[in-house]
Image: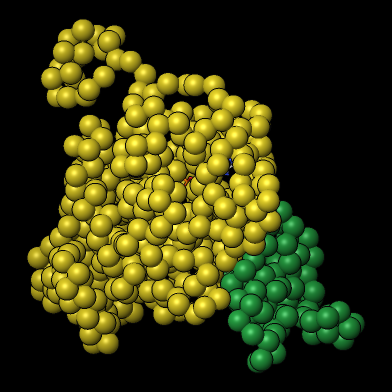
Amino acid sequence: MRLTCPLCGPRDRREFYYYGHEDYLQRPGPDAGPEAWDDHLHLRDNIAGEVRDLWYHETGCAQWLVVTRNTVTHEILSTELVADRKKKGVRA
Amino acid sequence: MRYSGWKVITQGLLGNKGWTPAWREPAPKAEYDAIIIGGGGHGLSTAYYLAKNHGLRNIAVLEKGYLGGGNVGRNTTIVRANYFLKGNQEFYSHSLKLWEGLEAELNYNVMHSQRGLINLFHSDGQRDAFARRGNSMINQGDDAILLDREGVREHLPYLDFEQTRFPIYGGLLHPRGGTARHDAVAWGYARGADRLGVDLIQNCEVTGIDIENGKVVGVQTSRGAIKAKKVGIVVAGRSSQVAAMAGMRLPIESHILQAFVTEGLKPVIHHVISFGMGHFYMSQSDKGGLVFGGDLDFYASYAARGNLPMVEHVMEAGMTLMPMIGRAKVLRSWGGIMDMSPDGSPIIDKTHIDGLYLDCGWNYGGFKAVPASGWCMAHLMATDQSHEVARRFRLDRFRTGHLLDEEGTGSQHNLH
Ligand SMILES: Cc1cc2nc3c(=O)[nH]c(=O)nc-3n(C[C@H](O)[C@H](O)[C@H](O)COP(=O)(O)OP(=O)(O)OC[C@H]3O[C@@H](n4cnc5c(N)ncnc54)[C@H](O)[C@@H]3O)c2cc1C
Ligand SMILES: [Zn+2]
C-alpha cells in the first residue's frame, strides 16, 4: 500500500502513522460533557467502504493528512493536507 | 451419534460408512424465541448455553456464510487466563475452567492442549510488571511462575538470549495456558447446540433488525423475515454494520490481523511463546506447522487480507528471537477482521432496545473467550441480568469512564 503525500509524492505505507477516523479533527470543548467526548474518542461509523481518516507522515514531511480510501479494497482515493483543509475553511 | 475411541475403531473397520452429519440443515422457521446473529465461536456457544443452561429450545443461529468461516476459523488459538484487571480476570479465569471441561461437555475433541505459555520480558521494569501480573493471576486462583533467564533457557534453549535489541531477562510462565483446534471448537459447539434443538441456519445474512415501540420483534434476512422477541448480535468484525441496522453507533473500529503457518515440521516448539516487545508470538500445531503472528496492520480495514509491511515486520521479529526458524518455509498467510474496542476489552450487554443484546469488542483475543462469552451472553439473554463475571463489560463504560484498559494505551482503537 502506498499513499501519495501532497508534499512528498507517492510513499511507502511504512512512512506513515495511522491515527484513526477524521472524527478526531472535531475535538469538543473542555466543557462539552461526557456524551460529546464519548462520541469523539470512542464511537465510530466504522464503514465498510469509503472512509476518511488521519495519517501522519512521520518519516517524511511530518504533516497530517486526511486520506480518503476504501476499507474493503485498500484503494487510496485521494489525500489532502489537514493544513490545506483548514485554509479552505472546511470545518477541521 | 456419541463419539468415542471405540466408534473410531469400529467405523475404521467398517470403512467409515456409518458416520452421520454432525448437525441438521433446517430451513428457517417463521418465529423463534431467540435469534443469534453470527455463527462464529461466540454465537454458537451462546446458542449452546441458552439451550443447555437456560432450557430454551426454540433458538436459531443465523450465519451469513458457513459456520466457523469467520475469525473463529482464522485465529492462532491461544487460550490463556493471564489478565491483570479486575473485571477481565474473573471472566477469563471462568473461561479457562470451561475449556478444561469442554471436551467432556461437548463430547468433541477440541484438542485443548495446556502446553504452557511463556511471555518474555527484556528489562528490569518489565520484570516488575510481569511479577505483579503473575501475583494477581495467582490471587485470582490461576497459575503463574516467574522465570529468570536460566529458567527460560531450560524450556526454550533455542532462543537468541543475547540479541542486542531485546536481550531476554526472563519470562512469565502460565502453565495452564495453551492452544486448541479452532475449527473443532466451532464444530463442537455447533453439534452440541444442534443436539439440543438449536436450528443452525447457514447462508442466511441478516439485512435488517425490526423494532417496534422500542422493542425488537424480529430480523430481515436473505432468506426472509424471521420473528423473535430476543435477538443477540454476535458478529465480531461486522458488529458496527449489524448494530447500525438498529440505529446504533458502536465504540468499535474494525482492523485486520494477519497470521502465518509454515510447512509441517517435527516437534520442536512445545510451548506458546509470546515476544511482546517484538510483536511476535508462536506455537506449533499438532500437524507440525509453526503458527505465528504479530500485531494489527494498524489501519481500519474490512479486507480479510493484510499488507506486506506487517509480513516483513513479523518475519524480522521471529528471526530476531529464534534464528533457527529461518529455513522453515511459510505455507500460508491470511487475515481476519477484528472488532477493536477503545480499551481493548469486550462488551456483553443489553442495548437501549428491549430484547436486543450485544456481544462484541473481542479485539485479537476472543478465541479463548468463546466458552465464557457464550455462557455470559446466554445468561444475559435469558435473565436480562449481566452474569457476575461479565458485569464490567458494559456498553456505556466508555461514556462513564469505567474503562478496562489492560495495556494502558488509551482510547485509540488500534493500540490494544
Ligand atoms: C489472525 C488472528 C489471530 C487470532 N489469534 C487469537 C488467539 O491466539 N487467541 C485468541 O483468544 N483470539 C485470537 N483471535 C481473535 C478471535 O479469533 C476472535 O476474537 C473471535 O473468533 C471472534 O468471535 P467469533 O468467533 O464469534 O467471530 P467470527 O468467527 O468472526 O464470527 C462472526 C460471524 O458472524 C457472521 N456475520 C457477520 N455479519 C453477519 C450478518 N449480517 N448476518 C449473519 N451473520 C453475520 C460472520 O460471517 C461470522 O461467521 C485471533 C484472530 C485473528 C484474525
Ligand atoms: Zn509528506
Residue B276 spot, x, y in % from top left = 34, 70
In this rendering, position of residue B296 left or right of residue A34: left
Q: Residue at x 86, y 79 (%)?
A: A90
Taking the view exactly as shown, the residue that stands out farthest to the front is B213
Residue B253 shows in the view:
no
The relative height of residue A65 versus residue B72 in the rendered view (above or below) is below
Quarter location, residue B48: top left
Residue B35 spot, x, y in % from top left = 51, 39
The relative height of residue B175 versus residue B74 in the rendered view (above or below) is below
In this rendering, position of residue B330 left or right of residue B237: left
Q: Which quadrant: the C terminus of chain A? A: bottom right
Q: Which chain is green?
A: A
Residue B130 shows in the view:
yes
Who is closer to the viewer here, B181 or B158?
Answer: B181
In this rendering, position of residue B53 left or right of residue B347: left
Q: Residue at x 26, y 39 (%)?
A: B110
Taking the view exactly as shown, the residue that stands out farthest to the bottom is A30
Quarter location, residue B194: top left
Q: Which chain is yellow?
A: B
Task: Give the tally of numbered discs.
Answer: 0
Q: Which quadrant: the N terminus of chain A? A: bottom right
Q: Residue at x 32, y 32 (%)?
A: B192
Who is closer to the viewer here, A25 or A36?
Answer: A36
The relative height of residue B406 versus residue B202 in the rendered view (above or below) is below
Colouring: by chain
Who is closer to the viewer here, B194 or B122?
Answer: B194
Residue A78 spot, x, y in % from top left = 79, 65
Q: Residue at x 34, y 37 (%)?
A: B55
Residue A61 spot, x, y in % from top left = 69, 84
